[in-house]
Image: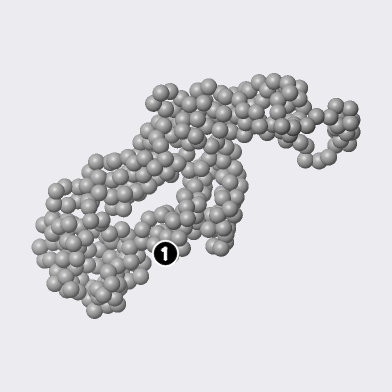
Amino acid sequence: MRDPYEVLGVARTADASAIKSAYRKLAKKLHPDANKNDPKSATRFAELNSAYEILGDETKRKQFDNGEIDAEGKPKFQGFEGFAAGGGPRGGFGGQQGGFESFSFGPEGFRRSGGGGRAGGAGRAGGFEDILKDMFGGFAGGAARGGQTFEYEDIGAHAAPPRHDINAAISVSLADIAQGARKRVRLPTGKEVEVKIPVGVADGQQIRLKGQGFAGPGGAGDALITINIAPDPVFKREGDNLRIEVPVTLYEAVLGDKVRVETLTGAVSLAIPPGTSSGRVFRLKGKGMPGKRGAGDLLATIRIVLPEKGDEALDELMRKWRDEKPYDPRKG
């Protein structure tokens, strides 16, 4: 994935307000609903959301700036301090920067190849096999009997955590959790799996995938997938309810009319009664988020928008109204 600063088009010195403003502007421009004829719009929108997940979170932004996580929010693995592979440089397998090496375990012991590295036995370089046993909880020893080969990345790969469970995160939209969806996510093991997104799932909720973690003496662990709901350029979620701003013209507010209002399941018509003030909220029953007790509501707030260019007739009418029928909406 590209650098999140590049995706959002902001400088590394940009403050939180500038980052949020850039996201909102691009989200409206790149939203799939506004680009229905562009098959790549969903990919660009997902990339935008992933970038904002990092830069919009103060902690994650610091971690990225410090090189602790990559552009996908994954921890960076920097190798082992003081460990020289085959007499090579310290820090990382084979001392290579960003290269791949294949490590195989067979009857002849531990061997490595690829990326210019030399093959060696299990006792070389201070004991690769012992280190891998510490990393994978005995997984390397079990692999030796089958002669299987695994690949590890020197920079940016993920060492196995102390436990055999692994963690990953996935970004979803409000539409995804309103209707249910299936998303693919790459695990720290390197495997890509499909995750079913439950309807009405909450932000931060975890989905457990049995047996998709690292293998160990007691069997494979689980994969814990954290759901991150991306900010939506149109709706704001409040529990099972959604909020939306509905811009209307001055004459629609004064005379009344029917206006189009977007919902997660398609647009509906909302009747605006005559004399509607800006800020008035209309409740659309059952048009919010699905929940255990049924769907929430959509709360539509009216916002009166005047024409961009001045109009002499409107100005004259307002002056006449001010002089003949004054009123004070701030009284009291």
At 81% across and 41% down in the image, what residue appears? Answer: 309
- Residue 244: x and y in percent read 58, 33
Report the front residue among 259 and 113.
Answer: 259
Q: Is residue 209 above or below residue 216?
A: above
At 32% across and 40% down in the image, what residue appears? Answer: 207
Other-residue count near label 1 (Cα within 10 Å), few / some / many at <14 / 14–19 / ≥20: few
Q: Is residue 241 above or below residue 172?
A: above
The N terminus - image quarter = bottom left
At 40% across and 45% down in the image, what residue appears? Answer: 170
Which image quarter: residue 248?
top right
Describe residue 28's horizontal placement relative to residue 331 as left or right: left
As drawn, the residue found furthest toward the front would be 332
The C terminus - image quarter = top right
Residue 309 in sight in this render:
yes
> Quick one: SS at disc 1?
loop
At 39% across and 35% down in the image, what residue appears? Answer: 201
- Residue 148: x and y in percent read 18, 57
Residue placed under numbered mark 1 in the picture: 67
Describe residue 71's horizontal placement relative to residue 324 as left or right: left
Which image quarter: residue 33?
top right
Which image quarter: residue 111?
bottom left
Q: Amino acid at mark 1?
A: Gly
- Residue 70: x and y in percent read 41, 59
Q: Is residue 144 above or below residue 242?
A: below
